[in-house]
Image (spheres, coloured by chain):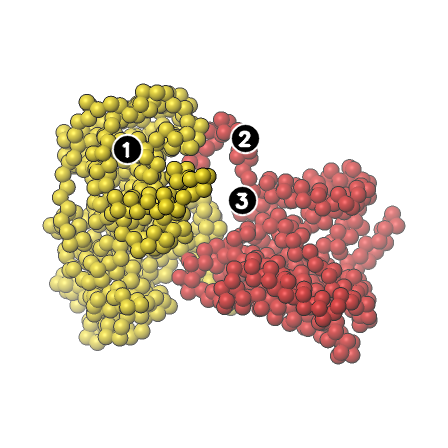
Chain colours: A red, B yellow
Amino acid sequence: MRRLILGHTTEFTLLVVMVLLCTGLSFATDRFLTISNAFDVLNVSAVNIIFAVGLLVVLISGGIDISFAVAASVVQYVTVLALNALGGGNWAEGFIIAGAVGLSLGFVNAFLVWRLNIISIVATISTFNIFFGLLMFFTKGVSIYDLPEWLSTRVVFYEREMSDGSWVELTLPVVVMILCCIATWFMISRTTVGRKLYAFGDNPEGARRFGINIGAMHYISFGWLGLMAGIAGLMQAHYAQEVVPNALYGRELDVLAATVLGGARLGGGKGSVIGCVLGVLMVSITQSGLNLMGVSPFAFKMIVGAIILIAITLSSTRFDKLLPSALRTSTKKGSAQQ
Amino acid sequence: MPSAASAKLPWRKEIYVIMSAEPLLSLKNVKVTFGGVRALKGVSFEVNPGEVHCLAGENGCGKSTLIKVITGVYTPESDAELYFDGKPITAMTPTLAQSLGIQVIWQDLALFDEMTVAENIGFQYAVNGKYGLVDKRAIEQAAEKALARLGVEIDLDKPLKELPIAQRQIVAIARALVGEARLVFMDEPTASLTQSETDYLIDIVRNLSASGVAVVFVSHRLAEVLEISDRITVLRDGSLVGVFPVEGMTQSRVTELMTGRNFDSAVIAADHDDKPVVLSVRGLSRAGEFEDVSFDLRRGETLGITGLLGAGRTELALTLFGMHRAQSGEVLIDGKKVDFHSNRDAIRAGVAYLSEDRLSLGLNQPQSIADNLVMASLDRLLSGGLISPSKKADVVSRWISALGVKIGLPEDPIRTLSGGNQQRVAIAKWLAIGPKILILDAPTVGVDVGARAGIFEIVRKLAAEGLSIIVISDEAPEVYFNTDRVIHMVEGRFHATYDPRRLSLTELESAIYA
């Protein structure tokens, strides 16, 4: 247990902050601490968590990606067009097409970063513009409301009416999200590929000298994010029951902030799936709580921004650093060994 | 192969050990050319099983290239011959080198900061698991075994970034042992270690060698090279100078072989009592760092401060330079009390400090030589609020010629220069502000023997011109031969002051390292 906490201080701090936040919110509004609200938060966060675990893999390997949310928009559009052309299709075909398109868009980023040696933030800002520009150009901004019937029908795995009359639902996006989390967790922490990704993000030169295939690391990390983005795009279309070309535009920064909040390090080598999930949930819970408290939606962004800042400060700064220097000398001597 | 067959017979092997061991690794006629420049001009190299072999030579002599040929990173020209265990090897690759048990501990260690000690040591198991899965037990067992073999205890669950540098070095060695190492190259393993840590490392190397692992040691510190090695191979300008047994070798002889020049060391200490006091420190203290430090530094005097790392030397220097504030005591410059709020105040008062970590703190590596050189003196180059290109060019050319820096163009990035030349630019950067007091903290770390002598020649010249200099170093010979007075710091206090004219180097060394 000591090991678990020491190894995951960020995640642990985040959990504590979240519990405090929930406690505060449940006193502030009587509808917050209900099972149905908890399920609501999960249903709303599912797509973002799928994005986040994909992005996590890129961050661990030392890269960054800005393009995945618009890539997911492209995937949505292409998938629905392809399915309609196939005469409707089914869930299996939907996942295969969405996954494959997402994967190839991820490979485009990997190619730019690895082959053309462009740093990942620049490469993906470019592809962000290219993907979105192409999408808007070819669709002229027109949304698709005519989805295949199976795609727009809600799939509910579990539902129940609570004694207070509220409704509890476990929907497909949540189940898919859980599967994506498990798959990502398994890949990064249980397979040799995952260890290589961490090593590459931590010390690229060290990894190279160990004979790790650096090119493969790029394709795996960006490819994984592409795959997750494809799945998330399909889930978003299913959840919204429509495909709006710019619906996901701007989502990348929310997801990036939540992922970093969850302990992933910009620069590589660090991050966990549980941290990602907590990061996204933290933002959702805040929004849900504010909503129930009747706070103006115009204030949401501001408050969410402040919460992210506070949480990141708490989890990454040692408290003694916030003290005036005169009070610090005694603590500093203890750490001088390092 | 007769040699391979004989190795299988234990009694034959013993005879070989007594007579002359069959080399574990043998290279002949290695030539490597980079873009028209011959880095290695037909070098031979041999390592015996279980021996500690030193590879000596100045920066750029081809040591690293040779290591990279042996580990398969570079391919030599086709007439080279390479034998391992008596068997010829036609094409060496990094994978083959690893499977033969050839391991390199690079100077920058190439470890993973965010991973734990166990994950670092057992990294080979982490990337080569069965079915592509990670076997945590195997990693931990391998790590435990490797550390036990070194006789070291380090918390396996600690993230590497929390370990001091000396322990990281041990982690790197342990990682090499996991790969069933038979031949370990150590590239400058002691560059960032203190004396006691170095002693510890030397013990570890001896243990390795006793257990049959051959160690090739690359180091600038000749004292430890002579202490630890059985034989020395000296390279100069890509050619083999020779292979020498360590018995009867002296530091000055090795230096001569490496540089092809002869450096006579003589004490330069002189009296400066007739000169005015420039810097006067009275009872300076800072909790946990140094206590009740008092000394005078006169015009043209060179003061050496030595002691083990952690004795408070650098902390004292940073306080004199205004980066830390003293809690009690006072500092007088030219008889006037000063109170520095930051190092800007110190620079204005004429104090310059050349940091210990030149590569990351002292110089801006991607920027040009010229920009680095004027970095501390920009306000002297202003003309109407803008930096005057002609004034800048004047300053740059004056200092480059004054300090004899070997450069291509002043516009070249500074990282293209050798360690010794970078250090000269770093010194020039501070001289350009026209200081009264120059503090040099570990000025020769990572600098070649030949270039070291050059740096101290500069120090002597500056002192003769009236600059007061403080040299901080944990290498006794450096302060002994190059300063007027040596202060020995122990646990933050001035333990003793020595006059190099009144004791021998050995006496000074035994006083410091005792």
The amino acid type of the residue labelled 3 equals: Leu
| Cα gap from disc 1 to disc 3, whole angstroms | 43 Å
Label 2 and label 3: CA atoms lie apart by: 23 Å
Q: Which quadrant holds residue B464?
A: top left
Q: Mark 2 lies on which chain?
A: A
Which residue type carries mark 1?
Ile
- Which image quarter holds the N terminus of chain B? bottom left
Residue B69 screen position, x and y as percent: 29, 66
Q: Which corner quadrant of the image does residue A18 belong to?
A: top right
Q: Is mark 3 on a helix, strand or loop?
A: helix
Residue B272 vs residue B514, the one in the foreground: B272
Location of residue B246 in the rendering, given as x and y in whole percent from the top left corner: 15, 52
Which quarter of the rendering shows the C terminus of chain B? top left
- In the picture as drawn, the residue positioned furthest to the front comes out as B384
Residue B493 drawn above or below residue B202: above
Chain identifier of the residue bearing label 1 in the image: B
Q: Mark 3 lies on which chain?
A: A
- In the rendered image, which residue does mark 1 sit on? B470
